[in-house]
């Protein structure tokens, strides 16, 4: 079996192992931002959840749906939060399809630090657009992931798509 290594990801995950107890959770802080403010990554707000671009994306357009409530356990989600998370993931898929026409998506959550959660104290759900051939030699040989679109430009396109869809 061949293995594909992504050493940059472990550096990112380890960066969160510092003692952050005295600092505000980055997801709780992000929830306070206005969607229209170009200096943050929030693209949509619902009643119980919000959606933002991932600052360290796996791929162009990598979004996260986050409940406002600061919880870490999957089983702590209310029925209403669970339902809205699914609706927001569906809306995110439509918006991403509108702006970038991906060939597929990865959708999921990393529950706990050992599963790869960089921030495990506030549950969040990922939706990552995928294209045929989107993995290339750069991560393998150069330890570099190529993200070809600026996050602010992606946010502008997503805001337009969300306005059409909602």
Image: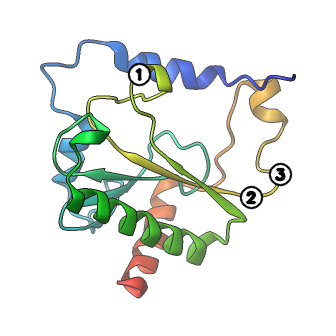
From where the camera sits, is residue 126 visible?
A: yes
| Residue linked to disc 1 | 113
Element on which disc 2 rests: loop
- Picture mark count: 3
Quadrant, the C terminus: bottom left
Q: Is residue 128 left or right of residue 121?
A: right
Circle 2 residues within 10 Å: few <14, some 14–19, many ≥20: few
Q: Is residue 146 left or right of residue 32?
A: right
Q: Are marks 2 and 3 in contact (CB under 8 Å)?
A: yes
C-alpha gap between disc 2 and disc 1? 28 Å
**Could you say where residue 101 lies in the image, as x and y percent from the top left?**
67, 72
Which label number is shown at residue 63?
none
Question: Furthest residue to the right?
Answer: 1
The residue where tag 3 is placed is 133
From this view, report whether residue 148 is shown above or below residue 116.
below
Q: Residue 68 in the image: x percent, y percent? A: 19, 51
Label 3 – label 1 distance at C-alpha: 29 Å
Residue 131, label in figure: 2
Front label number (2 vs 1): 1
């Amino acid at each position: 079996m061949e293995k594909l290594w992504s050493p940059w990801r472990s550096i990112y995950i380890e960066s969160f192992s510092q003692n952050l107890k005295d600092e505000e959770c980055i997801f709780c802080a992000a929830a306070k931002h206005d969607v229209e403010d170009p200096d943050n990554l929030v693209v949509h707000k619902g009643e119980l959840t919000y959606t933002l671009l991932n600052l360290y994306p796996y791929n162009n357009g990598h979004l996260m749906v986050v409940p406002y409530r600061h919880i870490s356990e999957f089983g702590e989600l209310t029925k209403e939060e669970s339902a809205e998370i699914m609706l927001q993931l569906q809306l995110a898929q439509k918006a991403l399809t509108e702006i970038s026409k991906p060939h597929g998506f990865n959708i999921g959550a990393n529950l706990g630090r050992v599963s790869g959660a960089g921030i495990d104290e506030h549950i969040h759900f990922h939706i990552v657009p995928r294209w045929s051939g989107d993995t290339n030699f750069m991560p393998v040989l150069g330890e570099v992931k190529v993200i070809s679109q600026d996050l602010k430009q992606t946010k502008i396109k997503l805001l337009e798509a969300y306005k059409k869809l909602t």
